[in-house]
Image: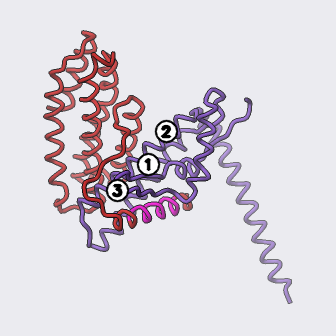
Amino acid sequence: MGYLYLMDSFKEMEKKNEIDKNIIKDINQTIKKLKKVKSNIYKKKISLSNRFSIFFGLETQEKILHKLRHRVSLAKEANDNPKVAEDALIILPGMFLLEKRIDLLGKGACKPASLLNFTTNLQMEALKYDLYPEQETKLRKFDNKIFKQISTGFIENVESIMHAK
Amino acid sequence: MRNKVLVDANVLVAASVKAFITEVGLEFKHHFYDISKPLFDFFSNNLEKRIGIYTEIIETTSTRVLSEAIIGDLEEHELKKRCNVKRLFEYYSLILSECIIHLKENMNSLTREPVNEKRLKAMSSDILNFYHDIRSKLLKKIRLRRYQKP
């Protein structure tokens, strides 16, 4: 199931002013597809920054779809009908474009920073329309040492970039 | 309230770089987080007064800084060649997502103001000329002092 199909379905629901829960099945299929692509990304023989920007793009799509599925499943009870369809129709085109950008990165026609930037902008837009989960991510095995190393490096980079601008 | 505060990208980013890992009680934040965040709390508490403002450039700069910082860090890891990629990606993804959520929260307490690009371009060339003049005057003074020293 692609985003164009999901968009058509939500358009139909918006017209009818009613949410069809059958779309959950299609959302699940899209999530499954994304998970499969994500699990192969670790071993790809491209640079780490390219791999991460693809990973982050895929994970963002997954999170948005999880939130969309959650809202669709509770639409009737939460009086979210057809608001959820309207919100989905605002965010899904961005997800479609993100998918295309990931393809472009694979062909070398897009830079990792640009893809990452596109993804973060999509996250911001999804947050605006309540289509991005706000709770903290839960990690199974947590390595304090590596996390501290990464977060320190990240903060140092942020500061040096800001200083250079 | 007539007064407005234009929040620049430095402050916006500093008040957004923070993550808390509930399971282990681990927190990381920008060095200036504690002094920047109260400003946004103040804006939030006085939302109807629309005190805090930002522009489109400030927004795009802030998100770009976060993305570039991650890419820069990953390039360093690439050079070291010793890393658990899966774990690395999980952590970077968590950090970036948390920062974006905080950035959005902070931006919600601000009002985006439109900018007249034509006027901005005209003004920025005047400002650049102004700084250029100061720089050359200062350099002249420094050279003169060096020359006058016995």
In the image, is residue A159 part of the stretch drawn in magenta?
Answer: yes
Residue furthest to the top in view is: A16
What range is drawn magenta here? A150-161
Instruction: Give coordinates of residue A50: x percent, y percent.
Output: 28, 57
Q: Tell me, what hue is chain B? A: purple
Up the image or down, B130 lies above or below B120; here it is below
Q: Chain of mark 3?
A: B
Query: Which of pointers 1 and 2 lies earlier in the amino acid sequence?
Result: 1
Instruction: Give coordinates of residue B68: x percent, y percent.
Output: 42, 56
Q: Chain of mark 2?
A: B
- Give SS at disc 1: helix
Disc 1 with disc 3 on a shared chain: yes
Instruction: Give coordinates of residue A101: x percent, y percent.
Output: 27, 44
Q: CA distance from mark 1 to mark 2?
A: 10 Å
Instruction: Give coordinates of residue A120: x percent, y percent.
Output: 38, 44
- Badge 2 is on which residue? B105
Kindly identify the amino acid type of the residue bearing the numbered disc 3.
Answer: Tyr
Query: Which of pointers 1 and 3 lies earlier in the amino acid sequence?
Result: 3
Mark 3 Cα shell of 10 Å, populated few (<14), some (14-19), many (≥20)? many
